[in-house]
Image: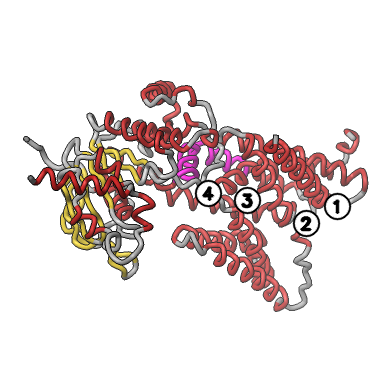
Amino acid sequence: MEKNLPVIQLNDVSFSYQHRRVLDHLNLRVYQNDYLAIIGPNGGGKTTLLKLILGLLKPENGTILVLGQRPQKASHHIGYVPQDHHENYHFPISVMDIVLMGCLSPKKRFYYSKKKHYNAKAMKILNQLDMADYASQKIAALSGGQRQRVFIARALMTDPQILILDEPTTGIDSKGQTDFYNLLRVLNKELTILMVSHDMNVVSSHVKSIACVNKHLYYHDQSEISENMIHRMYPNVMSEECPFEFLGHGIPHRVLQLHHNIGKNND
Amino acid sequence: MIETLQFEFMQHALIAALLTSLICGIMGSLAVVNRIVFLSGGIAHAAYGGIGLSIFMGWPFLLGTIGFSTASAILMATITLNNKERSDAIIGVIWSFGMACGIILVDLTPGYQVDLMSYLFGSILTVPPIDIIIMGVLAAIIIFFVSFFYADLLAISYDEEFARVRGVFVKTIYFSMIILLAISIVLMIQVVGLILIIALLTIPAYIMEKYASSLIQMMIGAIILGSLFSICGLMLSYQFNISAGASIIFVACLFFMISTIYNLLLNRN
């Protein structure tokens, strides 16, 4: 399969908070229309990796290229869907205003002159995501899954080439999650997607490749989670300690089933 | 009640109250949605240090106080940006440090006895015309700033990280906002007093947050509520011969309680 230049390229990237090394000599290549899940334990550096790619943080050493440019220059080609923090839950803002935030650009001041154009575009995107009926609603009136769609709509306003999502399904029920991942699958036809996720089940059944980040980065081309990989990322899961963290987010019998599948495939 | 307006001091008080409501409605909404109400309180109290410094050095009041307050505001904002978890404790320290400096500097000033307490409630009934003009100019600057940067301010207030990814000059705009907040607070301390500013900054904006569906609605609503409180307070003050600043705050707090109880009952059903 012919692949062009990588859309995201990390060469020997390291990053530390104060003196604690969070990411150590990372190398990563993400190609167009890839669908990459970034998994790993809490504090393993997943969100830090996203922030480096978004240009919100600068690497201690190594280089990052996004679409062949520095991340700070390329960030307007990235649609970013941050974690839903709930801290702005009561903010007086409508769905439409949040989506319009997506076309914000300091170089295009007086963007009000093009407001009609942007409004029409926003409505079109909301329509695609089945959220058009909520355009004038306050964000506080929506459910978690609906809020997440609004944030995706905001990210899509920028006509991005890459969509980056940080734990997008936190606080969404399982029906909502299924809809959400179906939506991402459709979007993936046009976009490269990077997603931080805790959800091993969904990760294994939807994405095209997986990067395990725990200070180091291990790249897996197929969306299969081998036993070996789980051991490396969650060393306590199958050994002495109770795997609460893992059980809380993954679905254990699915992992066992996968184990079985791997055996089958190797036959 | 209209006949009270034939008194010149009453006209001035009314204009000052309306300008204060205007400035507080806009800056207060920004303070509430950015969760920097505590920082605003810090700026207001630390301004005492500036008042003391101006008296001690013999500088003009506005120059010394605005300088001191802006510096402490920038310090607090820097700490808040870099250390979100512990910012409240650090703001508390700067808050008290400013006040202590003010009191010590006044103590050290030979032959000068000023009552710092008079800055608590201000004296809206004796506002000099020059202060009204300065407030008008500040109001115009604030309206220009907020309308020019409205989209950026909205994005920064709602989702700072997203704004940065979009290339908004987050720090420049955030600090401009903090500096405008500091100048607003200082200007109005001498007009309406420290407590009235904090009350008018937070109460109308906080009440409006529940009902408004956009930031601009919240600002306009807060201006209207603030004006309403000020006018009612001034009338009460005239009618019963009680102090104007306290009356305005009383009305605002009463309204706040009614609104809170109303919301509680509404949520129950």
Q: Earlier in the sequence, mark 1 or mark 4?
A: 4
Q: Is residue A89 visible?
A: yes
Magenta region includes residue A35: no
Question: Mark 1, chain letter?
Answer: B
Q: Earlier in the sequence, mark 3 or mark 2?
A: 2
Looking at the rendered structure, the kind of residue marked 4 is Met
Q: Nearer the viewer, residue B211 or B216?
A: B211
Residue A165 shown left or right of residue B264 in the figure: left
Q: Which residues are magenta?
A: B139-159
Q: Chain of mark 4?
A: B
Quarter placement of the N terminus of chain A: top left
Query: Residue drawn 66% across and 35% down?
Result: B221
Q: Is residue A69 visible?
A: no
The CA span between labels 1 and 3 is 23 Å
Q: Say which residue label 2 marks.
A: B121
Kindly report the distance in space between the C-alpha atoms of the residues bearing marks 4 and 3.
10 Å
Q: Are marks 1 and 3 in contact (CB under 8 Å)?
A: no
Residue A249 vertical placement versus B7 (above, below): below
Q: Quadrant of residue B162?
A: top left
Q: CA distance from mark 1 to mark 4?
A: 32 Å
A249 left or right of B12?
A: left
Q: Earlier in the sequence, mark 1 or mark 3?
A: 3
Q: Position of residue B194 (x, y in %)?
A: 71, 57
Report which residue position mark 1 lands on: B243
Q: Quick one: SS at disc 4? A: helix
Q: Are marks 1 and 4 on the same chain?
A: yes
**Residue A11 percent coordinates (x, y):** 16, 55
